[in-house]
Amino acid sequence: MTKHIIWDWNGTLFHDSDAVVQATNEIFKPYELPELTLDGFRAVFTRPIWVAYERLLGRPLDEGEWQRLDAGFHEHYFRLCDVCQLAAGAEVILSTWTGTQSLCSMAPHEHLVPKVESFGITRHFTRIDGLTGALGGEKAAHMTAHIEAIGVDPAEILVIGDSVDDGLAAKHVGARAVLYTGGMTTRAELEETGLPVVDRLSDALEHV
């Protein structure tokens, strides 16, 4: 029985796909690559994100190149995401779920917390965890620390996210997961995990 939902933020509760694509196009302008569309970025997207960048470039990143690209991406992204909104139905779902909820994101913690607060939804979460160290990487270790902090049995947790990495992190900690197609990952890749996949965020609650 599900008693607690762990939400992902970017691409799940927060509909920021346009900002992600635009910021990515900005950092790759010096490389003179064709401008990406949402579908084009979804075709190469994976985590860790530097692997997606290597796919775009068709080569391994040089020493220090990942750090430069990542810093540039976030500079553009933080500006562009100011106009992004919550995913359709997100506020209703957060308000109607009768169990507890928390937020575990790979976004920088110092940016995540005020962004969540700006939508007036902080009260719905027992805990909010973004990254406080180096950005990038995989989500499993971050999810493990989050679950230890909230003190909920993983067997009673449903993770709702938009990426394969969210599904892998849930499996790593022993929680169930539902994956949502509103982010950067294609439906086909999400379905390959064997986990339930939904096109509307509200449909995720059917799996609690």
Image (spheres, rainbow, N blue to C red):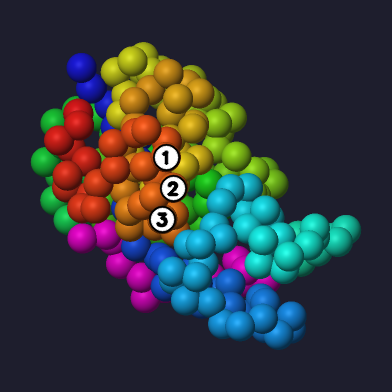
Give the residue drawn at x 69%, y 46%: 134
Specify the quadrant of the image occupied by residue 151. top left
Give the residue drawn at x 23%, y 22%: 2
Specify the quadrant of the image occupied by residue 30. bottom right
Q: CA distance from mark 3 to mark 2?
A: 5 Å
Q: CA distance from mark 1 to mark 2?
A: 5 Å
Label 1 CA crowd tier, 10 Å (few <14, some 14–19, many 20+): few
Looking at the image, do the residues carrying marks 3 and 2 touch, with CB atoms under 8 Å apart?
yes
Q: Along the line of sight, which residue is nearer the eye, 148 or 53?
A: 53
Region of the chain picked out in magenta, as a range: 71-88
Which label belongs to residue 147? none
Picture coordinates of residue 192, whole percent (x, y): 42, 40
Q: CA distance from mark 1 to mark 3?
A: 10 Å
Residue indicated by mark 1: 192
The three-letter code of the residue at mark 2 reads Glu
User: Is residue 43 something that shows in the picture?
Assistant: yes
Residue indicated by mark 3: 186
Give the main secondary structure, helix, strand or loop, of the magenta stretch: helix
Q: Is residue 164 left or right of residue 15?
A: right
Q: Earlier in the sequence, mark 1 or mark 3?
A: 3
